Image (cartoon, rainbow, N blue to C red):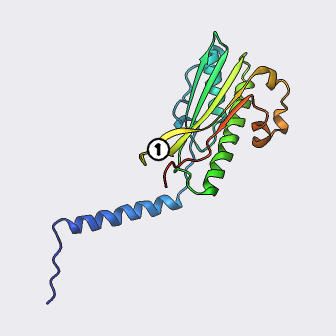
Amino acid sequence: MCISKRPAGMGIVAVLALVILGMLSACATSTHTVSKATVTGCSATSSAATQSAQDMLNLRACQAAGSEVVAVRTSYDQQAASVKVAIRIGGRVPDTDAEVSAAQKLTKTICLREQQAIWASGVTLKEATVTVIGPIQDEYANIVDGSYGASVLHPSTVVGLNWASLSAESAWDRYDYTFLRPYYVLFD
């Protein structure tokens, strides 16, 4: 007769592991659509007739947000006539050359969508800044939020833009100021 001895609780651990695996396999086959209402910062706060400039800019930024966006934050300075839009994306830290390239392309695409939406809002602006934030690895190997890139536009540049013919890459070359993170993992 063979009697196997297991430490107390191993049966429970095995059952929990099977339950978790079952849940994960169910998740892998289901589809999930993120609505704008689930994006942090994108809840409706006022009617269209009573919207302030801040509300209008936030609404436009939220409407431009793609499925990769998990949070939107807008900050409008009426006196300076400037807006700052922070877009937070989720996912894992880009590590390979292909992942870094994809993250940079996504950053440029988000900046184009957001800049176009902000400048089409009807709010008079002297400057619009869009910053894309996502997971990076810091010097202590912690996963933290960091800037993936940013774009700044002034009205004098916007006047010469034909939004319909711009790609994310061609727009990037036309912005007044840009920043694009070259790497996302500080130490390998």
Name the quadrant containing residue 2.
bottom left
- Residue found 73% across the figure and 15% down from its top: 124
- Residue found 29% across the figure and 66% down from its top: 15
Name the quadrant containing residue 7.
bottom left
Closer to the camera in the image, 74 or 171: 171
Residue 157 vs 30, above or below: the answer is: above
Give the residue furthest to the bottom. 1
Residue 92 vs 21, above or below: the answer is: above
Residue 109 vs 101, above or below: the answer is: above
Q: Position of residue 100 (x, y in %)?
A: 62, 51
- Residue hosting label 1: 138
Query: Which element type, helix, strand or loop, lies under badge 1?
Result: loop
> What's under tag 1, amino acid-wise?
Asp
Closer to the camera in the image, 102 or 55: 102
- Residue found 58% across the figure and 47% down from its top: 183
* Residue 6 relative to residue 174: left or right: left
Q: How many marks?
A: 1
Name the quadrant containing residue 95.
bottom right
Closer to the camera in the image, 57 or 36: 57
Q: Position of residue 157 (x, y in %)?
A: 80, 25
Q: Residues within 10 Å of mark 1 (few under 14, many from 20)?
A: some
Q: Position of residue 127 (x, y in %)?
A: 70, 20
- Residue found 79% across the figure and 33% down from its top: 174
